[in-house]
Image: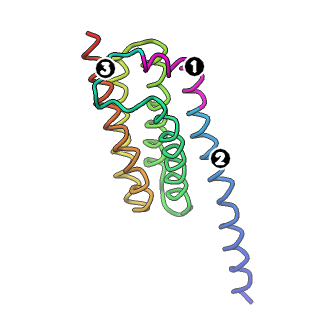
Amino acid sequence: MPNAGSSRTGRKQRGSRWPVLLGLLALCYAVAALGGLASTDAGDTYNALDRPAWAPPGWLFGPVWTVLYGTIAVAAWLVLRNPHDPTRTAMTWWSVQLLLNLAWTPLFFTAGEYGLAFLDICLLLAALLTTMVLFARHCGAAALLLVPYALWVTFASALNLAIWLSHT
């Protein structure tokens, strides 16, 4: 009879994980929405910038970030799925990178502070790489899910630097 109870407990634990995923998705997309509110004219601002020839078109950022915010949430969810695994440090770094991500848009688009935005994105990249290392200790798939995000942030860092240097 103990197997029947443990089976129900296992199903209950698995079922209770979905609200956590939905909460993480809501949090990540709230960060996206706040960034959008902080840069309502980002498209016009981006198009008016002196950009390098390799800069992507402005329309690409929305779809890319939509996917990336989803993977950021799912990666955290994968790490949090094991309640017996201490994840506090990993999730603290995940939170730090998300806050730095949130800070970048108003620094770059609203304030036009390209140098401070570059500092922020460099700190974001460092926090993200730390998050990936810590996530890998808990769940390799979670760390791998953050690879496209890290590549995009690296590219965005180079683009931010190029724009900053062209405006100094």
The magenta span reads 33-47
Q: Is residue 132 above or below residue 62?
A: below
First in sequence: mark 2 vs mark 3 = 2
Q: Residues within 10 Å of mark 2 (few under 14, many from 20)?
A: few
The quadrant the N terminus occupies is: bottom right
The quarter of the displayed image where residue 115 is located? top left
Q: Quadrant of residue 48?
A: top left
Residue found at x 60% / y 31%: 33
Image coordinates for residue 120, horizontal then vertical, percent? 37, 26
Residue 6 in the image: state x and y as whole percent: 69, 79
Q: Can residue 41 be found in the magenta stretch?
A: yes
Residue 113, above or below 58: above
Question: From the viewer's perspective, is 82 left or right of 158?
Answer: right
Numbered badge on residue 40: 1
The mark closer to the camera, 2 or 1, is: 1
88 magenta-colored: no
Q: Secondary structure at mark 2?
A: helix
Image marks 1 and 3: residues in contact by CB distance under 8 Å = no
Tell me the crowding category of disc 1: few under 14, some 14 to 19, or many 20 or more residues within 10 angstroms, Cα based: few
Q: CA distance from mark 1 to mark 3?
A: 20 Å
The residues tagged by marks 2 and 3 sit, at their Cα atoms, a distance apart of: 35 Å
Tell me the amino acid under the disc marked 1.
Thr
Label placed on residue 163? 3
- Please name the residue shown 43% across and 19% down the image: 47
Disc 2 versus disc 1: distance between alpha carbons? 25 Å
Q: Which mark is residue 23?
A: 2
From the top left corner, tell me how far across and down residue 29 is, in percent.
60, 39
